[in-house]
Amino acid sequence: MTGLLDHTMIRVTDLEESVDWYETHLDYEEKDRHEAEDFTIVYMGPEDMGDSEAMLELTSNEGQDELEIGDAWGHIAVRVRDLEDAYEKLMEGGVDDYRDPESCGGRYAFVKDPDGHEIELVLREEGSLWSLDHTMIRVENADEAIGYWVRKFEYADTRRWEADTFANFFVEPEDAPDEAMSLELTYNYDGRSYTHGDGWGHLCVRVDDLDEDFDELTLREVPVDRDPEACDDRYAFVEDFEGHEIELLERDPNAESLFSF
């Protein structure tokens, strides 16, 4: 499997408000949309994003007016070229002040979207402007979480940052392009547990052959949520050992629609 992270899915209550927010403030564009009977999915990302860059999937469920943003879900991080300038432009554009660069030691900053999903701003030269740099989730067992991604998906533990009370571990496929999104695993040393809520959806990993790669993952004892057959052989879902959902998707870059699996 390629193993690249294809997208991160989050749920929103007002789809058009969220689409407008990401278009207005992050210069995202709507890449594709799928309307089902009781939900709508919109893929979004920068206009000039490359094939190896990850998209943001916004999912709106019919009749869902409230979301619980559980603390097992952390944030997405987007790339900027000038941290102070990017944050100031967001403030001038009407985004609420949350955690400015100064409060974060001048190394990053945070804002929130209309549903309260946290978005980190990180200074990066690689990847397109505002593209997804990483997605952060919190884990209760760091050794198990790292081992899961290394053994099941053949990811590499590429970098880490350890403080007195917590540690961040970044994992991504071996030889991943610089512009590809990575996964940040955050582990707090105080032994806390987390709630998932329903605001956080899933990560999606690209595979080369859905059936073959799914069989390989089951051989590696990955917890299965929905197999390809249950998903009309279009995709599948597995889980890590803490319940984070991971979609497996065989992406055709030449398809007319992003939903042509």
Image (tube, rainbow, N blue to C red):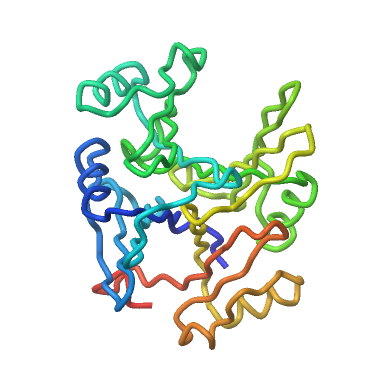
**Quarter of the rendering containing residue 158:** top right
Vertical placement of residue 78 versus 14, above or below: above
Residue 181 place in picture, x, y as percent: 48, 47
Quadrant placement of the C terminus? bottom left
Q: Residue at x 78, y 52 (%)?
A: 144
> Where is residue 180 drawn, in percent x and y?
46, 48
| Total count of labels | 0
Identify the residue shown where x is 72% and y is 27%. 162
Q: Quadrant of the N terminus?
A: bottom right
- In the image, is 203 to the left or to the right of 143? left
- The residue that appears at 64% across and 65% down in the rendered structure is 239
The answer to whether 86 is drawn above or below residue 193 in the figure is above
Residue lying at 76% horizontally and 44% vertically, measured from the top left? 142
Query: In the figure, 208 relative to 19: above or below?
Result: below
**Rendering quarter of residue 219:** bottom right
Q: Nearer the viewer, residue 41 or 218?
A: 41
Res. 236 image quadrant: bottom right
Say left or right for 176 vs 130: right
- Residue 2 appears at what percent x and percent y? 54, 63
35 to 92, vertically: above or below? below
Q: Can you give x and y, in whole percent of width and height, for residue 16 in the image?
A: 21, 54
Give 211 or 138, whichever is nearer the viewer. 138
Nearest the viewer among 47 and 69 is 69
